[in-house]
Every structure is written in C-alpha cells, then in structure tokens.
Amino acid sequence: MTTEHRAPGGGTIEDIVAVPDNEVALESLSQWQLARRRFRKHRLALIGLFIFGFMVFLAVFGPLIVPFNPMFLPGAIKAGGDQPSLAHLFGTDANGRDVFAMTINGARISVAVGLFSMIIAGVAGVTVGAVAGYFGGWVDNVLMRVVDVLFAIPFLFIILVSSRFFGKGDVLSLVLIFGLLSWPLIARLVRASFLSLREADFVDAARAVGVGDRRIAFRHILPNALGPVIVAMTLLMASNIVLESFVSFLNFGISETQISWGNALANAQGALSFGDWWWAFFPGMAIALTVIAVNFVGDGLRDALDPRSRE
Amino acid sequence: MTVTLDRPASDAPPRADILLDVQDLRTYFHVMDGTVKAVDGVSFSVRRGETLGVVGESGCGKSVTALTIMRLLDIPPAEIASGRILLEGKDILRLPEEQMRHLRGNEIAMIFQEPMSSLNPVFTVGNQISEAVELHLKVKHKEAVERSIEALRLVGIAYPERRIKQYPHELSGGQRQRVMIAMALSCEPKLLIADEPTTALDVTIQAQILELIRSIQQKTGTALMLITHDLGVVAEMVNDVVVMYAGRVVEHGTVDEVLLQPKHPYTEGLLASIPSKGMRGQRLNVIKGAVPNPFNMPKGCNFSPRCPYQFEPCLDLDPHVDEGGGPAAACWLWKQAPGYSIPARLHEAQVRAALRAAEASQVEVSPVLAVEAAEE
C-alpha cells in the first residue's frame, strides 16, 4: 500500500479501506455482463440461440436463396405430389408446389408474427404493468381489472373472432391481434415485480436524493424487474409461433395467397391419410424446431438472469 | 432537589440559528385495524452545523419522523395529521411535490440504515452519485463525474477514479455506506439525516463511519440529525438529544443534561440498560414490560405501565412535553401535575432501593442517582 492516498485527518480510514491494486484492477462486471457470461455456459440455450438465429436468417434471406417461388408451380400437378427427391428436396404437393420452398418461405411469416407480436406485447405489458405497480391505488385497480377481463374471455375465441372480423389475412393484422391480446401476461408479471421493488431500499435512497417518479419507475426499477420479463417474452414468442400455425391451420389466420408454416400444414390436412407425409412433416418440423429452440433460449435466460444462480 | 434545566431553545439562540424546526408533528398510519399514531406531537429543532441525536427503541417513531421530514412516506396510508416542519423558516410540508424534489438531496439529504440494499444493483457507483449531482447542480456529465470522484475521495474510498466504475455488489458494507454518504453529501446539503447509519455494520467499521461523518460535518458545516438507539454513539457525536418513546418526545436537552442527569425514567432506564464491564456474569438491566400496543395506548402517561416511579397522576393525566419553553421531560415526577404534589418519599424510596440494588451488583450507577444519593 502506498502512502500517497492518505485520508485527511489521520489516514486511518484510507489504510483500512484501501485494497491491493490487483483487486481494484479486476474487471468490473455489470449484472448484464454476468448474465451474458452465465448464458454462454448454458449449452442447450446456445444451441437454441443458434437454431433460432438460423430461422431468423432463413426468414430474412431464405426467399432470396431458394430456387423456387412456392407460388410458382415447379412440379407436376398430380394428386399426392412427388416424393422428396434431388430436384425437390422436401417433395412437392398436389399443385406442384415445392415443399422446401414453402418451408423456407413460411419461416418469414411465422417468425415475423412471433417476433413482432412479442415486441408489441412486451411494450404494452411493461408500460401497463410498470404504471400499475408503481403508482398503485386506483390506477392499479383500473388497469388490473382490464387485465382480468382480458384473461376472463377465452383467448382463442377472441383471436378467432377478431381475425375473422378485423383481420385481413395479412401478417400485420395477425401481429397486432396477437400482440394486443397477449400483453396482460407480461403486465401482471411486471406489476408484481414493481410492487415489491417499489419498497426496495434503493428506491427510497433514490427518492431521497430527489429523483422523480418517471425516472425511478423506468430507470431505477425497470432494469431490476426485467429478468423474468425477458424470459416470459421469449416463451410468449414461442407460444405465438405455435398459435399462428394453429390459427392458420384453422383458416382463420394468414390467407392462402401467402405461405406460412401454419398454412403449409393446413394445406397438408388431407394428404396425411394418403401417406403423403412430406407435405406436413417438413413445415411441422420447422415449427417444432423453432419453438423448442426458443424455449431453450428462454430456459437459458431464466438461469442467466436469476441473480441467485452464481454459476 | 430540583433539577432545573433550560431547553436548548430557551438558551435563547436567535431564530436564524435554527435550521430545522419541527413543531407538533403528528404522522398517523391508517391501516386495516385502525390508526397507528407513529409520531404523535413531536417537536424539536436542529441548529445550523450542529448535531441532534434522536434516541429511542425500535418502533418509537424515529424513522417515521425522518421520513416525514423527507416527505418520503406514501400518503395514504400515512397521514400528516398536524404540525409544521420549518426549514429555514419555510414550511416544507406545504411545498408542492415538485419543489420538494428539488429540496431532497440538495438541501436535506438522508443516509439509510441498510447500505447493502440502498444502492441500485444495476448501476455503477459513479452513475448513482453523478445522478444526484446532475439532478440538482446544473453541470455537465463530465463535471458531475469529477464531482463524484471528489465525493468518493472525501469519504475515504481509495482509488475513486476506478471505484466509480464498479457495481455495488463489488463493495463491502462499509464501502457502500461510504458511497451512500458521498451520494448524500455530493450536493452539499444543509441538513443530513442519518437513520441508524451504522446499525448494519460491524463494530470496527461503525467507528470509522461515525468518525467519517463527524469529520465531514466539521469540514462542510452540514447540520446532522442522527437517529440511533446507541447511547454510546450519542455521547460521542451529538450536541443535543431528543429521547422518543411511543411516538412522543419524552425528554430533550443537551447531551450532557440528558446523559448525565436524565429526568425521565425512560431515559434513566435506557442508560441503566447499557451493559458495562463491572456487570460480567450479571443479568442485564432491562426496562420491564414492552412498548404499548399502538392501537391501545395507556391513558395518561404512555410510559406509566413500565415506570418504576409511577404514581396517581401518571394514570390519567398526559405529561406531554409542553413546547413553549416549558419543561424538558414529559414526566409528572419531574414536573408538577395540577392538583397533585410529587410524592417525594416514594421517589426517594425508589432511588434508594435502586441504589442498594446497584451497589449489591456493582452496577455502574446512572449519575443522577448518585448525585441524589450524595445529597441525602
């Protein structure tokens, strides 16, 4: 310990507080950096992230790479289509559409619906939950009753009805419907964290130096509440991808003029009984793979963002 | 014998000398079971640059008083039923929230009990100090960072340039409390409220932190309101003392008056309950009974059920400290109850009994008892 860092008036404080250089020189890691480090050690989550990244890549660039436009009819028009072959890797359907092209193209809509509906639900849910949890009182009461009502109506029913009456079978309306209907889950989660964090000592301390309400809610409390929310959002995305395929399968979702994984499955409805497995198998696998991957990522995030799990 | 003591205020300090004047403050909490009168008619004042100690056991309303001054209580369930809090003559209870926010951290700052949880885990230490600076002083971010480094240096943190980039979880409890102090003092407030700043720290660190607060106070001229239940801390740190019991001030005076000549039996009990070296192997002296149920306060004197000297007026007359330059202890034994005369014999008998017991156990006798015994 050098003597140049003497405290005014005796130096006792400094002597005890001062630590060897090497400790201070240690890299300072924020909670996020620590979380990233923990995430990197989670093998399944890394695999999941890789697969999901690949799906996003396909969604963005896939249609440029695939040689066939799925709406063109490269194969022969015949009942049952063609089995997978070198010319058509995943086979063709009865209209002569290439299933490989359909699967790749379907990624764009399915991933977009999952991703963007998650973002809408996240923004709406976090805002409503934060306001309700931070201010409490009648504000909380009103907002949470709205959430209760949304939870009380059967989810699938509203989705089917609203996509029939408001949806135009396009991606945007489906994203909006999913996003605007799935935020209550996030809102409840955020509200619960805010209710407990509002009483935290560091919030009092921040108020005691004169920090205002909005800054406390969104700058001081929100980062502390974000861990579980991020996990919930990834899981929400997975379930919204499934939901898209389900709704499209029922012909309430994406119109048949476009290709999504759900549409591709709907298209395969009759084919399975004739043994034409490839119509449904490949788009179905794409859905399953993506959802599992996203769930793995969510799992990894859950572990990484939990401050109590120290490696 | 009569102990005549002047209240600090009647020492006639000019009004300009008083930084914070709390008058008849009442803070109630409306909860499901009724109303808790957490602070019930508390008055005291803090003089510029001086230290006021607020003493009392858990739940006596010390912290609520502090939070009321900072206006950090949620209303409802809290209600400030009456009173004035004058900061340099200006009643801060009437300020709009917007102005109050400018006051917090800027003119009145507060240090909390729990350094471990009072810093936000997701921000660096530097971030949190400079936030306070940027909020109140119109300075650029770079200058705020420099001020933060200065503040950390002032509170004895080594290598402040590097420390500001660290996160709270990388610091020890003592270091975090230093950071809290740096944060509180970064805008040079006129009044610092320290709510049991050393309770959560171990003994050696406690002494350092108190020494630090005192040295900074001397350097900056900040007035200090020190809330504690540790009479040792009071003896070392403060000029004036307010003793609180069940939401009320039961005694106040200068530190010498209160510690050397306690007038209220509660203060006396607190002093007697400090363990001392001579007591090895003995049972600790305690004040019998427990703090009264807040929903069901005793009639008369709040302390009467636990008071060894209790006599008739204590049971139905309230000996509340009279704030008009009146007596400094809320006790009928010390001030005359209307229509009653103080039963001197009872008092003396009690004192003698206490002394005998003390002698038998070689307990350090509280000085007032010794004085009275000598005069007999």
Image: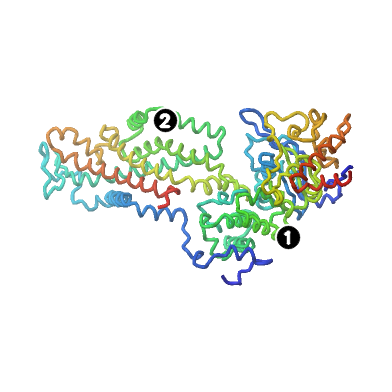
**Mark 1 — residue?**
B218
Where residue A220 appears, x then y in whole percent? Answer: 53, 48
**Mark 2 — residue?**
A151
The quadrant the C terminus of chain B occupies is top right
The chain that hosts pointer 1 is B
The Cα atoms of the two marked residues, 1 and 2, are separated by: 60 Å
Left or right side of A307 for B142? right
Question: Which residue corresponds to the image point at 60% horizontal and 63% vertical from the top-left?
Answer: A16
SS for callout 2:
helix
Left or right side of B339 for A264? left
Left or right side of B68 for A135? left
The chain that hosts pointer 2 is A
Question: Which residue corresponds to the image point at 59% horizontal and 51% vertical from the top-left?
Answer: B115
- Of residues B156 and B299, the one nearer the viewer is B299
Where residue B324 appears, x then y in whole percent? Answer: 85, 40
User: Closer to the observer: label 1 or label 2?
Assistant: 1
The quadrant the N terminus of chain B occupies is top right
Amino acid identity at mark 1: Gln
Where residue B134 appears, x then y in whole percent? Answer: 60, 56
Amino acid identity at mark 2: Phe
SS for callout 1:
helix
> Measured along the vertical axis of the image, is residue B198 above or below residue B41?
below
Question: Which residue corresponds to the image point at 49% horizontal and 47% vertical from the top-left?
Answer: A224
- Of residues A285 and A105, the one nearer the viewer is A285
- Is the same chain shared between marks 1 and 2? no
> Measured along the vertical axis of the image, is residue B259 above or below residue B214?
above
Residue B130, picture quadrant: bottom right
Where residue A230 appears, x then y in whole percent? Answer: 41, 45
